Amino acid sequence: MIRTTIIPKQTNLEITIPQDYVGKQLEVFLYSIDEISNTEQPTETNNKLRGKLKLTEQQYKDFNANVEEARHGWNRNT
């Protein structure tokens, strides 16, 4: 993975792709850092939500089983 920060001097941008990336599907993001600096960070959101479900022991076990099942679904090669 290649990640870098730049300050463009014009509206055109040329990207050189490493040889081992040729023929692969790539994802490219373009955003200004100040666009995201004003948003709430995920850890702050996670801290606000921690402990809010108030689940019983059985509900907690069922919830975790569903989460694990969903995670295994993400790893399938489809």
Image (cartoon, rainbow, N blue to C red):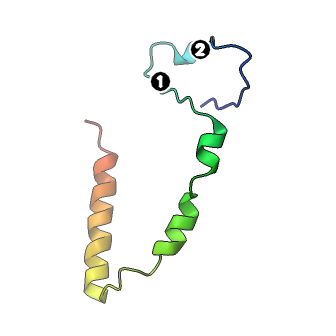
Res 53 quadrant in image: bottom left
Q: Residue shown at 57%/63% (left/top)? A: 43
Q: Which badge, 1 or 2, is on the more N-terminal residue?
A: 2
Residue 18 position (above or below residue 1): above
* Nearer the observer, 7 or 54: 7
Circle 2: residue type: Ile
Crowding near pointer 1: few (<14 within 10 Å), some, many (20+)? few
Q: Residue furthest bottom?
A: 56
* SS assignment at label 1: loop
Dots 1 and 2: beta carbons under 8 Å?
Answer: yes
Task: Name the quadrant of the C terminus.
Answer: top left
Q: Is residue 17 left or right of residue 75?
A: right
Q: Residue shown at 63%/29% (left/top)? A: 2
Crowding near pointer 2: few (<14 within 10 Å), some, many (20+)? few
Q: Which residue is mark 2?
A: 17
Residue 52 position (above or below residue 16): below
Q: Residue 74 placed where, x, y %?
A: 32, 47
Residue 21 position (above or below residue 36): above
Q: Which residue is mark 1?
A: 26
Task: Name the quadrant of the N terminus.
Answer: top right
Circle 1: residue type: Leu
The alpha-carbon separation of the residues under discs 1 and 2 comes to 10 Å
* Nearer the observer, 43 or 60: 43
Residue 78 position (above or below residue 47): above
Q: Residue shown at 32%/64% (left/top)? A: 67
Q: Is residue 72 left or right of residue 19?
A: left
Q: Residue 48 placed where, x, y %?
A: 51, 73
Q: Residue 22 placed where, x, y %?
A: 51, 13
